[in-house]
Image (spheres, rainbow, N blue to C red):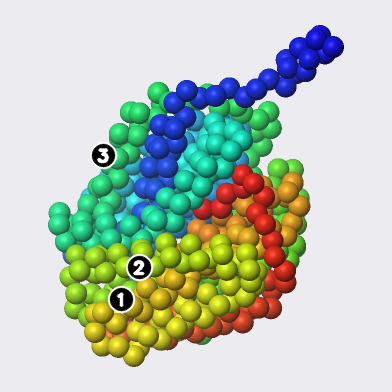
Amino acid sequence: MAHATHTATESHPEPAVHPRRWMLLTLLCLSQFMLIVDVTVINVALPSIGADLHLSRETLTWAVTAYTLCFGGLMLLGGRLADAFGARRLLLTGLVLFTLASLVTGLAEDASILIGGRLGQGIGAALLSPAALATITRTFHGPERNKALGIWAMLGGIGFAVGAILGGVLTAGPGWSWVFFINVPVGLSLLVLLPRLLPASPTHGDRRIDVPGAVLVTTATGSLIYGLVKAGDAGWGSTTTLVSLIGSAALYAVFALVERRTASPLMDLRILGKRPVAAGSFLMLIATGMLLSFVFLGSIYLQDVRGLSALSTGALFLPVAVATAIGAHLAAHLIAHAGARLVAAGGLLVAAGGSIELTQVHSTAGTVIGLAIGAVGIIPVFVSATTTALGFISHHEAGIASGVVNTFHEVGGAVGVATVSTIAATGIAEHSGTGFPSAYTTLAAVAAVIALMVIPRGKAELPEGVHVH
């Protein structure tokens, strides 16, 4: 009996405990926080960037979407590379690339350098984020893992609001370049500290990488965004718009064919055939798109229409940050009692109500109330998306489903900003409020109706240890 116990212990040894795992978690969360902040930190700086570099609405939209396009489009590839070549190597590579790209973006003197730098930041983020998450899941075990993932998710959510606030402070202070320069000392500090703490990471024997799939899905999304942005100036029926949108659809179709035939697909598209995953992915796409477009349009609206400074605009996003925390707190309780279906639809209608509020007021206080109401409504949609996608499927499918939902999370930001920028193009060009709230209201109302149709009835629970940021 003693021999049997000894053998079992040798066959299934207890996982090694990292002695400085909480310090490692702090640094990894800081890395992820930096990536999430960069999604929104640029928004309040947009009017200043546009004025200094003489940029059009189209270029300013790309300054926002280029980052999330690469971040989302290449995230699954980043995760696959981390598995094949080691999370430690990919994490540090992504951090170096993100830091260098931030420096280049801050030094930009024209549109090409600005957009190129943002693309570089997005590629770095796509390598860093999944590698950091993989490191956390391998470093922590049992209840500690759930706690660590909870901290990771919480900081990611706060980052969206903090980005807008920080963007206002930096733009009003040392200048808009510092919304990018701020990443350089943070990145360099992480590069000094992380190598001392990062454990050696295992690699998989199969190093087949679906590069064609990654290129196709990113190019297809880029073509979609280009068509959406062009429609704001050239019109929906213009040759450029139609060619871009049709080309995007064709590229997505080719991507689907490649994924079905490749030995190591980037994405198992069969998972999207499951109604809960498809519905959750749709909700995540809409929620991220609406949140980032709200920050994008709200930043321009407050400065160009209300005439506020960058500092005042950033400060006014503090109540919005509080509203997101309230929305997140309410979401879990509401979903437990009413289910994701009603919470998602209700949250979208609340968000629509916030944008309607913006059309009815002509004061700064009323504007902030509208933004806060919109934020309270959107955050429960995020929680509903995760619950829907992962709570109605078997546990062994949760990993691939979470990867798909994470991709829609990032890509949704790029598509949402491009779409609402186009719908509100006249208002942006004329520095008026026209199109801002109406674009948001329409999108939210339509999404609420779709949510009621596609989200399964009933209640669901998330598998333990699964994370969607």
Give the x, y percent position of residue 168.
Answer: 23, 62
The amino acid on which the numbered mark 2 sits, given as a three-letter code, is Val
Q: Would you place residue 15 above or below residue 427 in this image?
A: above
Q: Amino acid at mark 3?
A: Pro
Find disc 3 in the rendering and name its residue.
185
Q: Residues within 10 Å of mark 3 (few under 14, many from 20)?
A: few
Asked if residue 46 lies left or right of residue 385, the reply is left
Q: Amino acid at mark 1?
A: Val
The residues bearing labels 1 and 3 have C-alpha atoms spaced at a distance of: 33 Å
Q: Which residue is mark 1?
A: 368
Q: Nearer the viewer, residue 135 or 59?
A: 135
Q: Nearer the viewer, residue 71 or 209?
A: 71
Circle nearer the N terminus (1, 3): 3
Residue 287 seen from this side: yes
The answer to whether 225 appears left or right of 180 in the picture is right
Specify which label sits upstream in the sequence, 3 or 2: 3
- The circle drawn on residue 320 is 2
What is the secondary structure assignment of the residue under circle 3?
Answer: helix
Location of residue 458 in the rendering, given as x and y in whole percent from the top left corner: 72, 69
| Real-space Cα separation, disc 3 to disc 2, in angstroms | 28 Å
Lateral position of residue 419 relative to residue 56, left or right: right
Residue 275: horizontal and vertical position, in percent?
73, 66
Seen at 28% across and 86% down, the residue is 432
| Among the two numbered marks 1 and 2 on one chain, the one whose residue lies closer to the N terminus | 2
Mark 1 touches mark 2? (CB < 8 Å): yes
Crowdedness near tag 1: few (<14), some (14–19) or many (≥20) residues, C-alpha within 10 Å = many
- Disc 1, SS: helix
